[in-house]
Amino acid sequence: MKPWIRRGLAGLFAVLTLGALSGCGHYRDHAGWSASPEEQARHRAHVVDRVASRLELDEAQKAKLAVLVEKLQAQRAAWAGQPDARAQFQGLVAGDKFDRAGAQALLHKATAAIETRSPEVIAAFGDFFDSLDARQQGKVREFLQHRRGWWRRG
């Protein structure tokens, strides 16, 4: 193998290894789908503290943000559905044909869960956003404007 190819491959391997290791260095307290209630509470507190520090919130605003984060997490849990949602989905493809009626029923159940919690989330967000001053609202707008997803940065 030519030396420049070997060096190039070694450099590429080093870059990929460093990228993978740096990706592991982020905040590790993920309150994901299977997190315990304690982990979820710890994650909510982390999110509230982080946003509060960036927006320079006072205690009343921080309390409204905590309510909003709690409502969002409750809506997410309702959307996740039953603990056996994965098994239900596997049941849709267990036979030789896809169970379209079963899939539609799962979709209706998830949609109903979201629709029942959405007014609470909207009210909590409205209370939080209305409590912000003009400078803080501008920061929120700027964040939402620049937050376009992974592939459309900048």
Image: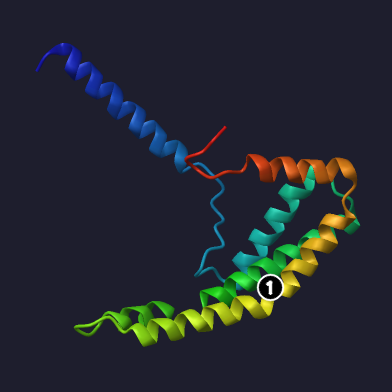
Residue drawn at point x = 18 percent, y = 19 percent: 6
Q: How many marks?
A: 1
Quarter of the figure that contains the N terminus: top left
Q: Quadrant of residue 96?
A: bottom left
Q: Nearer the viewer, residue 79 or 3?
A: 79
Q: Nearer the viewer, residue 93 or 21?
A: 93
Q: Position of residue 116 (x, y in %)?
A: 67, 80
Residue drawn at point x = 27 percent, y = 79 percent: 93
Residue drawn at point x = 34 percent, y = 32 percent: 16
Crowding at mark 1 (Cα within 10 Å: few <14, some 14-19, many 20+):
some
Secondary element under disc 1, as helix, strand or loop, is helix
Q: Quadrant of residue 106?
A: bottom left
Q: Quadrant of residue 134?
A: top right
Q: Position of residue 80 (x, y in %)?
A: 52, 74
Q: In the rendered view, would you say 80 is above or below 138?
A: below
**Which residue was labeled with disc 1?**
118
Q: Residue furthest top?
A: 3
Q: Is residue 32 visible?
A: yes
Report the amino acid beneath label 1: Ser
Q: Position of residue 119 (x, y in %)?
A: 74, 74
Residue drawn at point x = 23 percent, y = 24 percent: 9
Q: Is residue 105 left or right of residue 87?
A: right
